[in-house]
Amino acid sequence: MRLGYLLREVANAQPGLVGQVGAPSPELIVAGGAPATLSRLVGYWREAHPEAGPLYWASRSWTMLIWQPLYLLVWATHRCKAVPRLAGMAQRVDGGRVSGFVLGAHHPLDEARLDARIMAAGVEARALCPQLLADLGLQIRLHPKMAGRLQADCLLAALLAVARSRPEWTPEYVCGLAGDWLAAAGLAGQSGLCRFGLPGGGLGLGLERRVCCQHFRRADGVLCSSCPRWTAPEREARLREEWLC
């Protein structure tokens, strides 16, 4: 499969996930690259929400850094039946937002077997994310355990996004895929999915987070619907309400 076609398919499926084929320009974030742009990303969140503190600034910067590569891997694996290589991936930053990226020209891995594609995507994530975390660590401290759980949440959020486009997928099937993705990325047990009943029957799915993203620390912040700080019944009620909106 051609990389350009894969990127167009992913962009059509996921808002904000717009990739190009080419060489990175100096102002983009590249794993292991110059720290200036990453410093500006962290600085944005520090200045925008000084009251939230360093744990929020770090977690918010981290989720911004990883959402594009993880969503790209999950969408490409399931929608395009191919896996792009993430080496040299360069990400665009606008203030505190990371959206848009550049990949070097290559042929994505074409693989008919879903389990082999998921394992290959996991290899890509295992190679990229530790370097991004090391880069972030030069700017602000984020404990690897927290980083891993946030990464697992992001990975499963991407899977849920794909699942919403595949009505033939049953909740049981999606939960099985969730375990496969977490294992492939070296994140087994770091997040999960919960099932909840819907009015009139049927089941909904939501994240069963194992770590708080710290959004509540902002002056305008609240607990997310899937926050582990809620009791299980409170979280289920909020996830059901969100599902039905």
Image (cartoon, helix red, strand yellow):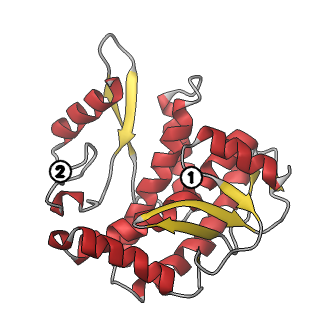
How many angstroms separate mark 1 from mark 2 (CA)? 25 Å
- Point out residue 104 in the picture as x, y percentages from the top left corner: 77, 69
Question: What residue is drawn where x is 66% and y is 53%?
Answer: 118
- Left or right, 211 with respect to 40, comes to left
Which label sits on residue 222? 2
- Point out residue 128 in the picture as x, y percentages from the top left corner: 60, 73
Q: Amino acid at mark 1?
A: Tyr
Q: Which residue is labeled 1 in the image?
A: 71
- Left or right, 125 with respect to 145, comes to right
* Secondary structure state at the residue bearing disc 2: loop
Question: What residue is drawn where x is 41% and y is 67%?
Answer: 95
Q: Are marks 1 and 2 in contact (CB under 8 Å)?
A: no
Q: How many marks?
A: 2
Quarter holding residue 97 = bottom left
Question: What residue is drawn where x is 49% and y is 80%?
Answer: 37
Q: How crowded is the residue under tag 1: few (<14 C-alpha within 10 Å), some, or many (20+)?
A: many
Instruction: Using the image as rendered, state which of residue 128 and residue 136 is in the foreground.
Output: 136
Quarter holding residue 177 = top right
Question: What residue is drawn where x is 23% and y is 52%?
Answer: 228
Q: Amino acid at mark 2?
A: Val
Q: Looking at the figure, which quarter contains the C terminus?
A: top left
Instruction: Using the image as rendered, state which of residue 132 and residue 146 is in the foreground.
Output: 132
| Above or below 190: residue 104 | below
- Point out residue 132 in the picture as x, y percentages from the top left corner: 52, 77
Mark 1 or mark 2: whose residue is earlier in sequence: 1
* Secondary structure state at the residue bearing disc 1: helix
Instruction: Using the image as rendered, state which of residue 89 and residue 27 is in the foreground.
Output: 27
Which label sits on residue 103? none
